[in-house]
Amino acid sequence: MKILVTGGAGFIGSHLVERLLQLGHQVWTLDDLSTGKPDFLNNVKHHPEHTFVHDSVLNRNVLQELIDRSDVIFHLAAILGVKNTVENPLKVIEGNIDGTRNVLELAYQKRVKVIFASTSEIYGKNENLPFKEDSNRVLGAPSVHRWCYATAKAIDEHLCFAYAEKGLPITVVRYFNAYGPRQTSSQYGGVVPRFIRAALNNHPIEVYGDGTQSRCFTYIQDTVAGTLAAMDRQANGLAFNIGSDRPITIRSLASTIRELTGSSSPIVQVPYEKAYGPGYEDMPARIPDLTRSKMVLGYSPTVGLEDGLKKTIEWYRQNNT
């Protein structure tokens, strides 16, 4: 098939592009490189079935041209990162909603199948675990910028389901803490690469809060597998949790990474206020219910945390990033 991947030079997107090409599809990657990196596509730079377009989903003319030639769209382009939500909420809100609206409006004209990449963030601080796809969303006040990303992605989902009711074939995948090679290592990126980078340099591993908060980390191979499965027409009009359902505390994650890297890094606690400013809120746990994903998509994560961390650590060693 002819497939468009927005945000295809990003962490998840670049792995998805590689896999699509391996499966024999023709792929266009659209990315403005605001967070993605050209190097992430080095493995497919000269692939005869791959075309990279350096532009944005906010450019409707370019987007129209790409969608007109596509059979499927994977919409991964997004403004994300906890620190972005605190520092630049307008960028997060407008960047996510405007881009998704463009993709859906243009896809609807030709009824092109869309797989929309959402996030476990939309569940907010709901304490009723595990999260099912129809679980309630529990968020803080609108004046707390911490929740603007969750809100923007939820509005994106509302748009998706509204277009689904009008006949657009669309599937929503909600990612739970994907990690692996190429994930950005910064306060704007994930906790796994931040810990690995600190450990490899024997720098303090900074755990925000008390470290008892838990997450389910999903190796990129499993994230991509769940995303690809969403192409199936049985998945149309539905949302799916894509992740692991085995939680680990952030403190334990830091200890595991320190052990796997053979690091002498101390593990230190950093108050949320110091990391993100006053008023930051976090949720104590985030665990997906995978029942629907298993039944409809046949999805089941296969890479255990320790094996995935070893592969990720090796990539960081080789790339010194």
Image (cartoon, rainbow, N blue to C red):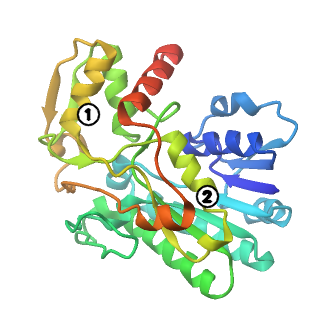
Q: Is residue 285 left or right of residue 309?
A: left
Label drawn at residue 253:
1
Q: Residue 139's x, y, as percent?
A: 26, 70
Q: Residue at x 25, y 72 (%)?
A: 138
* Front one among 145 and 72: 72
Q: Position of residue 148 (x, y in %)?
A: 36, 64
Residue 83's spot in the image, x, y percent? 34, 47
- The quarter of the picture where residue 262 lies is top left
Above or below, comparing residue 316 to residue 223 in the picture: above
Write down the residue under mark 2: 229
Is residue 310 shown above or below 111? above
Tell me which label, 2 or 1, sits earlier in the chain: 2
Within 10 Å of disc 1 (Cα), the crowding (few <14, some 14-19, many 20+) is many
Which one is in front, 310 or 96? 310
Q: Position of residue 183 (x, y in %)?
A: 48, 35
Q: Considering the numbered disc 1 on the image, is that residue within a helix, a strand or a loop?
A: helix
Q: Identify the residue shown where x is 17% and y is 25%.
A: 267
